[in-house]
Amino acid sequence: MGAALVEAALGPEAPPKCTRCPRLVAYRAENERHEPNWFNGAVASFGTPNCSLLIVGLAPGRNGANRTGRPFTGDYAGDLLYGTLIRYGFATGEYHARVDDGLRLRNCMITNAVRCVPPQNKPEPLEIANCRPYFAARLESLPKLKVILALGRIAHDQTLTTLAKRKALFPFAHGARHELAPGLALYDSFHCSRYNTNTGRLTTEMFHAVFDAIRHELP
């Protein structure tokens, strides 16, 4: 990949019942009591390790990936993300918001900065740091990686910290492209959450514009 990682990694995926973050473990237990048939665990990355594009989200949503067990699956953010991936040729099939819908990614993987659902979608700094070894291992496991797309500032910052890059040199901005190393670019987008789209902070056209640029870079 051509960029040094700041931590030795545990492995690319957290165990489903990871115990590194007490607050997240307690929240998982609460969700399990209310919804015992949900996935309720650390959500693994989705895609293939020979990909050129890695999409980094914030964390599983309670009613989305925490429920279904697949990143961005089961809530509005997935509707926009997967529809866009299909549009730009990074996914095939149809997205029906469930893990057995047959959707497949092409030259693309999706992961999260934090693998377990946090209360109110707000992970704490220590929880982000606790998950960093898994993220580091995920980056290390992608030998053909050329583009990272960070969905939101936390994903952006997790990427920079993991790769030992100074944040001041790579400021987050929607639509920005940063050259992190020869052959490795970081793109930024506002997160494709319902809140951002409902408030107009992110429009479908704005999201597609980022993928226009990525598609041009990864023909």
Image: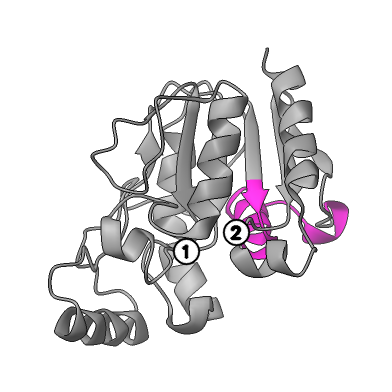
User: Residue at image x 20%, y 66%?
Assistant: 38
Position of the C terminus, as image quadrant, is top right
Query: Does residue 6 appear in the picture of this structure?
Result: no
Q: Are marks 2 and 1 in contact (CB under 8 Å)?
A: no
Q: How is the image coloured?
A: one colour
> Quick check: 139 above or below 124?
above
Instruction: Specify few, some or many for label 1: CA neighbours under 10 Å numbering under 14, 14-19, or 20 or more.
Output: many
Q: Main secondary structure of the magenta part?
A: helix
Residue type, mark 2 in image? Gln
Pointer 2 or 1: first along the chain: 1
In this rendering, would 95 be left or right of 203? left
Please state the horizontal and vertical placement of residue 63, each as a whole percent of the image: 37, 69
> Quick check: 61 above or below 21?
above
In this rendering, would 145 be left or right of 64? right
Q: Nearer the viewer, residue 28 or 165?
A: 28
Q: Provide the residue span drawn in magenta.
A: 150-170
Instruction: Specify few, some or many for label 2: CA neighbours under 10 Å numbering under 14, 14-19, or 20 or more.
Output: many
User: Residue at image x 74%, y 25%?
Assistant: 182
- Label 2 sits on residue: 158
In this rendering, would 136 be left or right of 87? left
User: Residue at image x 56%, y 44%?
Assistant: 81
| Residue 181 belongs to the span the image colors magenta | no
> Secondary structure beneath disc 2?
helix
For residue 59, the mark is 1
